[in-house]
Image: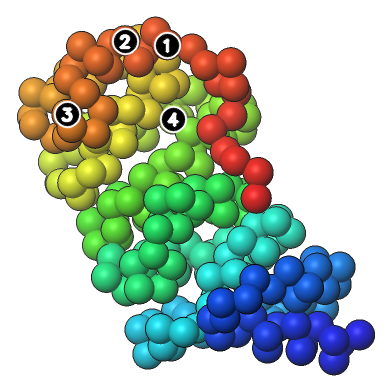
Amino acid sequence: MEDTVQKAIEAITQYSTKFPQKEFDIIRANKEEATPYLRSAIDRAIAEKKEIGEDASLHFYALYLLAEFQDKESFPRIMELASLPDDTLDFLIGDAVTEGLCDILYYTYNGDLKLLKQTICNVHVDDFAKSAMLGVMKQLYLDQVLSKQEWQDFIRKIVYGDEEIGDYIYTSLAATICECHFMEMLPEVKRLYRDERVDPYAIGEFEDCIDMMFSYRTEANSCICPI
């Protein structure tokens, strides 16, 4: 069986126009045997960066498969991948930064809240990757894993911080406050707009944020998509 799994891994290591459904089925059916290969693929992408080549695909598939397996041991290495320079990150996973990274990090989250906080506040990390991490924290709050007080304290630390930690992250922060319905934090949202840190083309003007604050979705207990 180990040989079968290895062949399936080899078949998805390089890009192919054929969708590898058979290989995915084999990997899913042999989670224990496949997981070390998938972890190694992430490690290789971190080490080689752009040198891994344009046709390399195993690291990309590995992100989603490890998330599907809810492999907590992979969380630090995926966070390290997500912390690579924005041009390198875009080369390695492209639109997955905005379309899937939040879900991937959530399903592999190992409880290391300190790592999430430190990385979000790291000025050198891609803004959209940090926004994905912010989304993980928002879901942890909705799951009642992260207390409201700790969550709000962290948000305020960024809003009132002296150091600029990025660009788009502040727009994400304003949206997050509204999506969590923190009415008491409207002054923080207003400050972000006053300091011109929010992109109105992304989430609208301050008045639109107030509307968002009072808009409740039926699925408000979850902002995470199934893998």
Residue type at mark 2 is: Asp
Residue type at mark 3 is: Pro
Residue type at mark 1 is: Ser
**CA separation, marks 4 and 2?**
22 Å
> Mark 4 = which residue?
151
At x 27% / y 43%, what residue is drawn?
169
- Mark 2 element type: helix
> Mark 2 = which residue?
211
Q: Earlier in the sequence, mark 3 or mark 1?
A: 3
Furthest toward the right, the residue is 1
> Would residue 203 be found to the left or right of residue 20 on screen?
left
> Mark 3 = which residue?
200
Report x, y in % for residue 200: 17, 29
Is residue 20 at least partly visible in the picture?
yes
Tag 3: Cα neighbours inside 10 Å, few (<14), some, or many (≥20)? some
74 to 135, vertically: above or below: below
**CA separation, marks 1 and 2?**
6 Å
> Would residue 28 be found to the left or right of residue 38 on screen?
right
Name which quarter of the figure residue 85 lies in.
bottom left
Residue type at mark 4 is: Trp
Report x, y in % for residue 9: 70, 83
Disc 1 + disc 2, Cβ < 8 Å: yes
Report x, y in % for residue 53: 41, 88
- Mark 1 element type: loop
> Mark 1 = which residue?
215
219 to 43, vertically: above or below: above
